[in-house]
Amino acid sequence: MECNGCEFRAELYYDKESQVWARREDDGTLTVGMTDISQSIAGKILHVRVRRPGTRRPIGKPVATIESGKWAGPVPNVFDCVIELANEDVLEDPNLLNIEPYEAWIARVRPVASLEVALKDMVTGDAAFEMYKARCLRDDIHCERGMR
Amino acid sequence: MAEREAGRQRGNAQWAVIDTGLRDADENMALDHALMAAVADGRLGASFRFLHFRDCALLGHHQSPRQELDLDFCAREGVQVQRRLTGGGAIIFDETQLGWELVCRREALPAGDMSFLAQEICEAAALGLRQLGVDAQFRPRNDIEVEGRKISGTGGIIDGQVVLFQGTVLIDLDIPRMLRILRVPLEKLDAHAIQSVAERVTSLRDLLGRLPSKAEVKEALVEGFRAHFAWDMCETPVPEVLTTYLPEALAIVRDPEWLQLQDRPRSEQALLQAVHRGSGGTLRSELLWDERGKRIRQIAFSGDFFVQPRRAVLDLEAALRNSHIEDLPQIVERWYHETPVDALGLQPSDFVQVVREALPCA
């Protein structure tokens, strides 16, 4: 599924601005990453830094920061969590976030409360796609993957 | 073009211009945190700040102190080391330079993508510098330059809906000192190294033949932003609200962990060089190589060759900054075909070759 060339995956959970995605894992953790919209807005990503495993990150305190061209910025965090793991492949080659935003996850985190509480402000499925499309159209975002 | 004009006009018209005076690096960096927090909380409106620093080195947000700086030299000489919120490379700052920045909500700035926004802000700053009588221009991807030589570096951060974009103005510059701080060893600090930087960086003193006052430069910059964006910019005292945010912000930047956010060995970022002899002359490359990301962080070409205009080579260096090694041939080809280069026998492949020969296991 896509809008303006921006890929969308219905099985994932998204924040209200469609900036980040989260995937439920069997062990009770969440895998988080940037959406196609976010990587396109950011442009060629040169640096990624993920907070140390074991670090607690409350809502609003970023799990990771990225840098692309002239801009740096935190990857938004919408649930209270503890970082368990950073994706070493992405740390090694941050450009993967541009090439395959839904495969190149950034971190695996464990919500401090239950998964349900963590995901209560995120949207999935058709509702998420409507939100995602609305963002693409509102801000006239066109996606391009694979930029180096 | 009409879209561009419309974008500019969408910006917020009211800006407070503040000058936080001469400060240590940690206070200035803490003020960046404080300004962003105050804007995020809706307790501060769009602000344009001038910054003055005591002797210091500022790392880009994702840089490692060990990789970028001669930390022993900094400690010996009392050069403070701090980390910026914004990205980009390490810079030195002292009382002969002026910092400027804007902090606001996203909607206070023209609509458009992030590269458009950076370009718009840089063009406003360049317009300001032109009021001083120098031909300052925005150079795509990087900074503000005068005839190919950098006079202002810039960078930004966007956190949710809050934007901070900042830049420097080199009013004067002590190149040997800059090189020492940015870890060029004493034995390599020769006339060639100094000349090489002097060909790529300039200062208002250098260009004007006099040292303009900071008041003059400040006025010119404000005029540039006012004219470019049609903003109403009004000088105001430093907002009282910042004092409520400052203690927490100072605690963040004074925590040793802040400086060690990124700590990588020097070996992952080597200074490499090679010499290539082709039919067009002898070409030398010197590059800062990011082994981990397989990227050219910085590069300088020199040697015995003829290229006109001279700034064409500086433009190629700028285009190659932070590029992935796989993109090298395309970038060089694009530069060769898009720039009116007269290179007397020197081919794009010569530039590609001299970079590749410098790399480990070339």
Image: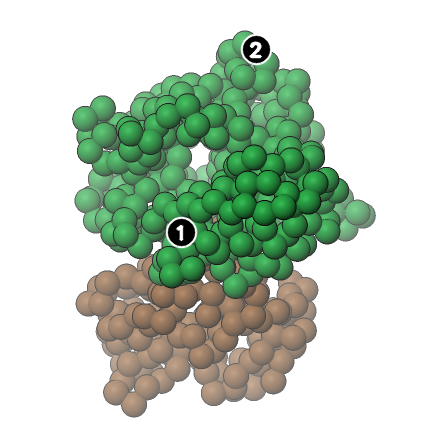
Q: Nearer the viewer, residue B29 or B129?
A: B129
Dot 1 falls on a residue whose secondary structure is strand
Front residue of this view, candidates B158 and B129: B129
Earlier along the polypeptide chain: callout 1 or callout 2?
A: 2
Q: Residue B337's spot in the image, x, y percent?
A: 73, 51
The amino acid beneath tag 1 is: Trp
Q: What shade does chain A have? A: brown
Image hue for chain B: green
Q: Residue at x 54, y 9 (%)?
A: B210
- How many residues crowd around disc 2 within 10 Å: few (fewer than 14), some, or many (20 or more)? few
User: Residue A16: x and y, percent?
Assistant: 50, 70
Vertically, is A88 above or below B60? below
The lab-note entry on whether marks 1 and 2 share a chain reads: yes
- Tell me which chain the residue with mark 1 is part of: B
Q: Where is residue B295 drawn, in percent x and y?
A: 45, 56
Identify residue for label 2: B209
Q: Residue furthest top?
A: B210
| Spatial CA span between label 1 and label 2 | 36 Å
Residue drawn at x 49%, y 74% as measured from the top left: A101
Q: Secondary structure at mark 2?
A: loop
